[in-house]
Structures are given as C-alpha cells and as structure tokens.
C-alpha cells in the first residue's frame, strides 16, 4: 500500500449551468512533503464547513484503483489526481477492505476512517455530468473521510501501513451500503452503532433507523 498523490486546493467561486457557488473540490497534486494537521491538510481549504473539514473529516481519501473503473464507465482518459476531490489518492486501500475505526499510518501521520463520502452536485459540476452523484453513490466507491490521530508530514510515494484493525470490523463499503444502498436492517444499524470512530452525523442516521422500527 502506498500514497499515490497528495492533492490540495483552496475554495473558489464557480458557476455551472446557471448555478453559482463556492467549492473546494478542485484539488491539484502537489510535490514535496505536506503536513497533515488535526483539522486539515496544509494548504488545503473547504468552502462548506458543515460537510467538510474539522476533526472528524480532516482528510478525504480515495482509492487510486477506482480511476481505471471510472475511466472505463465514463469513457474518459483525462483524469488527474484529485479528480474526485480527494486529498489523498491511495493505492491498495479499498472500501471493501478498510474498516471504519482502523488505525492507519500514512507517511509520518496516523489516520482513522470515520465515514464514507457522500457525493453532491459539486462533484457533478466538476466532472460535467448531471446526475453523477447518484451514479457515484450506487457504485459504492465512496472513498472515506478520516480523523488525524497523529499529525505528520507526507508525500507521494510514502508507504501506508495498517496499525490496528477495528474490533467491530465493519468496512467502509458495508457502512455506506447500510445507510444508502440496502434496505434498512436493525441488526446492521446496531452493528454500525458499535463503531466508536463513526462520525456523529452517520451515528445519528443509524440511530434514526433503529427508532423507526
């Protein structure tokens, strides 16, 4: 497992199809070592602080392997690192394998996945594909947000190492499917609530599933 690319960008104003908004989704690969701090990656910024950034979503990670998948599905070969708005493009770290709550060393930093990524219209605007947010969600290739347990510098080419597996052992893909793709299941929701590292927003969602029984 290795860090393929480190991607940063500052919020900018855009207007697409008559809709004007600010977004930090336009990330670009950066050379050299970058410090990953508790709330953010050095040099990076978010426009929507309700849904991005902060201690539970300090860094967004996306598997490099999905680039080939989307290239085939979308018939495009113009992708650049940071294409999906991710800070860290990771090799060998897939949603079907990594668990919410795992402890992972990336370069000098240590991170812990907290939730899958939920796509929105800004991803559609970046790729120029209306409705892509639903396509992205249904693929269950969400990537994941992580909190920073230990700050540190990192750069493309750094190794990635699993330090500790979460005791619940519920993968990012399983958590994403439980909330958005599968029929609500009380047993699965209860299992998700055992994930101590799960972000507050996702915890509330699974709590609602249980109260609706």
Image (spheres, rainbow, N blue to C red):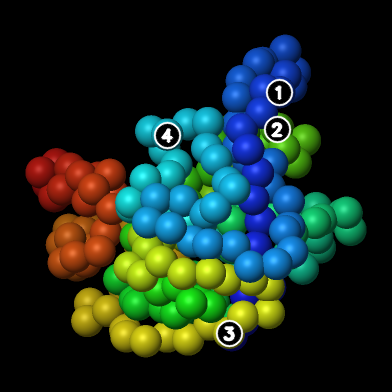
Q: Residue tagged by mark 1?
A: 14
Q: CA distance from mark 1 to mark 4?
A: 17 Å
Q: In the rendered view, would you say 166 is above or below 123?
A: below
Which marked residue is nearer to the observer: mark 3 or mark 2? 3
Q: Secondary structure at mark 1?
A: strand
Q: In the rendered view, would you say 26 is above or below 103?
A: above
Q: Earlier in the sequence, mark 3 or mark 4?
A: 4
Examine the rendering and report whether any part of residue 64 can be seen.
no
Q: Which residue shows up at 74% across the image and 64% down it?
A: 31
**What is the number of the mark on residue 111?**
none
Examine the rendering and report whether any part of residue 199 can be seen.
yes
Residue in the foreground of this view, choosing between 67 and 44: 44
Callouts 3 and 2 close, C-beta under 8 Å: no
Q: Residue tagged by mark 4?
A: 49
Q: Earlier in the sequence, mark 3 or mark 2?
A: 2
Q: Earlier in the sequence, mark 2 or mark 4?
A: 4
Q: Residue tagged by mark 3?
A: 159
Callouts 1 and 2 close, C-beta under 8 Å: yes
Residue in the foreground of this view, choosing between 196 and 211: 196
Q: Earlier in the sequence, mark 3 or mark 1?
A: 1
For label 1, the crowd category at 10 Å Cα-Cα, with few meaning under 14, some 14 to 19 and many 20 or more, is some
Q: CA distance from mark 3 to mark 2?
A: 33 Å
For label 4, the crowd category at 10 Å Cα-Cα, with few meaning under 14, some 14 to 19 and many 20 or more, is few
For label 2, the crowd category at 10 Å Cα-Cα, with few meaning under 14, some 14 to 19 and many 20 or more, is some
Residue 101 in the image, given as x and y percentages of width and height = 30, 71
């Amino acid at each position: 497992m290795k860090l393929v690319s480190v991607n940063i960008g500052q919020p900018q104003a855009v207007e697409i199809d008559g809709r004007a908004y600010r977004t930090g989704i336009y990330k670009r690969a950066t050379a050299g070592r970058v410090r990953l701090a508790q709330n953010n990656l050095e040099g990076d910024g978010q426009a929507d602080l309700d849904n991005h950034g902060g201690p539970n979503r300090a860094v967004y990670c996306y598997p490099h392997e999905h680039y080939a998948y989307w290239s085939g599905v979308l018939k495009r070969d113009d992708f650049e690192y940071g294409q999906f708005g991710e800070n860290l493009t990771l090799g060998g770290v897939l949603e079907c394998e990594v668990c919410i709550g795992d402890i992972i060393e990336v370069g000098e930093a240590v991170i812990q996945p907290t939730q899958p990524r939920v796509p929105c219209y800004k991803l559609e605007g970046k790729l120029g594909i209306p409705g892509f947010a639903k396509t992205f969600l249904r693929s269950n290739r969400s990537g994941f947000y992580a909190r920073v347990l230990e700050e540190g510098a990192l750069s493309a080419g750094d190794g990635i190492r699993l330090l500790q597996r979460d005791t619940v052992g519920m993968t990012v893909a399983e958590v994403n499917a439980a909330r958005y793709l599968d029929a609500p299941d009380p047993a699965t929701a209860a299992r998700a609530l055992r994930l101590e590292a799960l972000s507050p927003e996702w915890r509330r969602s699974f709590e609602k599933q249980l109260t609706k029984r």
